[in-house]
Amino acid sequence: MATIIKQNTPLVTQPLKTSPATGATLASMGLKKTIPLLHGSQGCGAFAKVYLIQHLREPIPLQNTAIDQVAAVMGGDENLFEALKTLCEKEAPQLITVMTTGLTEMQGTDTYRVIHDFRRQYPQYAATRIINMSTPDFSGSMQTGFASCVDAVVRQTVQPPSGRQKQRKQVNVLCSIGMTAADIETLQGYLEAFALDAIMVPDLSLSLDGHLDDSDYSACSTGGTSILEIELMADSCATLVLGRSLLPTATWLKQRFDIPLISLDMGMDIAQMDALVLALSQLSGKPVPDWIGRARRRLQDAMLDCHFVLSNEQIAVALEPDLAIGYGKLLASMGIRVPRIVTTVDAPGLAELSAAEVVIGDLASLNPVVAQVSTIISNSHAAGMFEPQVPVLRAGYPCHDQFGNMDIRQFGYEGCRERLFALANLQLRHHHDEVAPHISAYRFGADEVQPKERAS
């Protein structure tokens, strides 16, 4: 059990936390033909847009209501109303997600009322769904904003069960912010192996997988799960939850539609994957395919190979809660000691980790343990602070100093194996001998050798 420590300092010098609106924007990108609309100033939208573009290296069609100094005082309802009208008229998206900021939350803006008035005045735009959510900058983090977006979309969209018979069983999958496009694709492969149809919410593997779109420019997201699919979630036989931040949404589906839920954290260690595979086999009534058994044995071999380098090492973690729990369990499965985990908000599951301390704080909270750890698992901001003295394995957001962030696989037997190899290789490249090699005082180099004179 880890000790939870909440940082109470008047100044944050090295922030780990990012605004909830940024997380909600990311979640919106996993929904088909969606425009995220930030109800706030242009600066708020620009920050979230640049932040995500640097990490993903993809266009982010984020719009904002351009609250200026007048609207900040007098109210920004008209700005939101006009923004909705412009987007519906010019772009005709399937969905607009309306997110708040600290400014509009402090104003007390009632986005639900504005949307209701817009619907009543412009019935011709009924084909475009408009969903509001609360994402104030002063509360929560990027993960909570992501979860708020998923929760709002599900609760405001899902329809009662249709009662139609399906050829294959359908499963809802709620994907955490910690999952990359490669993770979601890997999970889809596992579900397909058991002949299960999946509704992934959100599905970043179709929108942010690094593909070139047919059109040069799109004002909406270029892939993801459609609203029509989300409407049919009540017909599913189970809800699979990746990441505890989405448990409230799965619980609502269970209470409202009696859909069983399966929660397995992030699927980043062999025990969680064994539980998932067993659950999918029981759900589908099909045996485990041979390739999954082989993937498990390959992970076991990787654990044997890497334990010489990783076992009993000390590694620190600084990530959002879901991903921190995932990496915490992966490290514990290898016998790695974790003196400190730093995360953004207090969340369920953190106290269960095999770490000495869990600090709710910023990256500066790593300073007391830097001298005793061999590696840190965190983002590019941590790398800027601690490298080259301590190597940083890139994970989470933002990682703007490397390519292919959405191609990094963490989930599944395959993902665990690849992450262990990445950690072990990082250890090898930065290995320091505990005992310095002895250099004899009588040692000489090749240039000091004198040729032997021949006797005349």
Image (cartoon, rainbow, N blue to C red):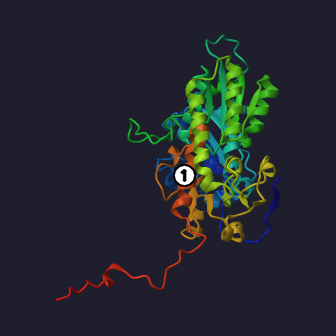
Q: Which residue is mark 1?
A: 422
The residue sitting at 61% across, 54% down in the picture is: 308
In the rendered image, residue 231, in percent from the top left (x then y), is placed at 66, 25
Asked where in the image residue 338 lies, by quadrant, the reply is bottom right
Nearer to me, 315 or 114: 315
Give the residue type that dot 1 points to: Ala
Q: Is residue 410 among what the camera can see?
A: no
In the rendered image, residue 188, in percent from the top left (x then y), is placed at 57, 30
In the rendered image, residue 316, in percent from the top left (x then y), is placed at 68, 60
Q: Is residue 286 above or below residue 56?
A: above
Extreme residue toward the bottom, this view: 456
> In the image, is 254 to the left or to the right of 225?
right
The residue sitting at 73% across, 53% down in the picture is: 140
In the rendered image, residue 248, in percent from the top left (x then y), is placed at 78, 38
Q: State the SS at label 1.
A: helix
Counting other residues with Cα less than 10 Å from the Cα at mark 1, is it few (<14), some (14-19), or many (20 or more)? Answer: few
Nearer to me, 369 or 191: 369
The residue sitting at 61% across, 12% down in the picture is: 167
Nearer to me, 20 or 117: 20
The residue sitting at 66% across, 69% down in the picture is: 370
Nearer to me, 187 or 21: 187
Asked where in the image residue 373 lies, by quadrant, the reply is bottom right
Q: Quadrant of the C terminus?
A: bottom left
Extreme residue toward the left, this view: 456
> In the image, is 66 to the left or to the right of 315?
left
